[in-house]
Amino acid sequence: MTSIELPEARILAEQMQQELQGKRVQSYRLQDIERLQKIGLMDKDTGSFEGLIGGRIQSVVSRGNAIRVKLNTEMNLILAPEYGGMILYHEVGEEIPTKFHLRVGFSDGTALTVRLTSIGLISALRDRELERSYIYRRDFNPEVPSPMDEEFTFDRFSSLIKDENRMLKSVLVGKHAVIVGVSNSAFQDILYRARVHPKRKAVQLSGEERRALFKSIGLVLQERVRLKGKEQFLDLYGSQGEYTPAMGPRMRGQSCPACGTPIDKLSVGGGYVFFCPSCQK
Ligand SMILES: [Zn+2]
C-alpha cells in the first residue's frame, strides 16, 4: 500500500467533503488497535471517539498529509495514513472489509473505514485539543506554507530557501521543512525534474535552479492530483491512482530516460534518494 501524501490526502478530503458533509455519526468501532497505540499512532485512551457520536460532519479539509474531519460539535477526526493506509466509503448494504482500525457508521446506513498499514495517525480530538497532535501542529500550522496554497509564489519560496545552509532534503521534507506536504517520494521526483543533485544545499542554488525547483514542486503535486494519486493509491471508492513518479525506487537498475546514464542512489537524511548522476548537477 502506497503512502498518502499531500496530493492523495487532498483527493480523499475532497471526496469525503462531497460524500460525507451533513451526515450524522451513529456509531464507531475500533479494532486491532493495540499495535497503533503502542507506537503512538492512536491515543491510549480511546474515550474521545465516544464524542463523535451524534455529531454531524460539517467539513473535510486537508493540509500537508493530514485530513481534518470537522463535526458540528467541536469534535474532529484527524486522519493521516501518511506511510500507507486506506480510507474507504461504503454505501448502504455494501460489504465492509474485515480489516480496519476505525469504522464510523452514519445514521443513513453508510459507513467509513480507516486502516493504517504503516506509520500514520487516527485521532479524535476536540477543537481545543487539536494542538496536542503533532501531525496537526505540523501540517495545519499557518506559518508553514503549503505549496498548493494559491498565495504560494516563487518569490515566497525563494525567500524561504535561499539562505538555508542545509541540504535540500531537510529544507523540503520532514520536521524542519520550510513547506508542508513534500515527502521523500515526491522529493526524488521533484529533484530529477528540476535537474538538481540531491546533495546540494539550498543556499548554493542559483536563481534559475530555485525557479526550476519551484516549478517541479508545483508540477509533481498537481499532476498527482490530476491523475488521481500515485499508482497503488486507493481513493475513497477504492479506485487506483494513475500517477507514475519520474524518479524513485522503481528506477532501480534502470537507465535515465533522458540521457541513458544508469540511475544511482544515495543515502540522504535517513532514506535513499534515486537520481541521475548526469542530469542532476
Ligand atoms: Zn539523465
Image (tube, rainbow, N blue to C red):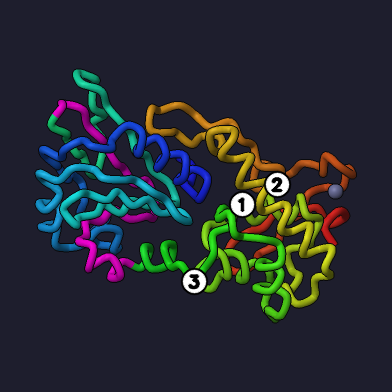
Q: Identify the element where label 3 is drawn.
A: loop
Q: Identify the element where label 2 is drawn.
A: loop
Task: Give the image quarter of residue 140.
Answer: bottom left
- Confirm whether the magenta stretch covers residue 35: no
Q: Tell me, yes or no, whether the two marked residues, 2 and 1, touch with CB atoms within 8 Å.
A: no
What percent of the width, then of the height, locates residue 158? 71, 69
- How packed mark 3 is, by other alpha carbons closer than 10 Å (few <14, some 14-19, many 20 or more), is few
| The residue stretch that appears in magenta | 108-133
Mark 3 or 2, closer to the camera: 3
Q: Identify the element where label 1 is drawn.
A: helix
- The Cα–Cα distance between marks 3 and 1, rounded to whole angstroms, is 22 Å
- Mark 3: which amino acid? Glu
Q: What label does residue 247 carry, if any?
A: 2
Label 3 CB-ligand 1 distance < 8 A: no
Residue at the disc numbered 3: 143
Q: Tell me, yes or no, whether the two marked residues, 3 and 2, touch with CB atoms within 8 Å.
A: no
Q: Earlier in the sequence, mark 3 or mark 2?
A: 3
The quadrant of the rendering that contains the N terminus is top left
What percent of the width, then of the height, locates residue 197? 78, 62
- How packed mark 1 is, by other alpha carbons closer than 10 Å (few <14, some 14-19, many 20 or more), is many
Residue 35 appears in view: no
Residue 189 appears in view: yes
Residue at the disc numbered 1: 186
- Mark 2: which amino acid? Met
Which residue extends farthest top? 93
Relative to 274, 42 lies left or right: left
- Confirm whether the magenta stretch covers residue 126: yes
Residue under the point 47% across and 44% down: 10
Q: Tell me, yes or no, whether the two marked residues, 3 and 1, touch with CB atoms within 8 Å.
A: no
Residue under the point 14% across and 42% down: 28
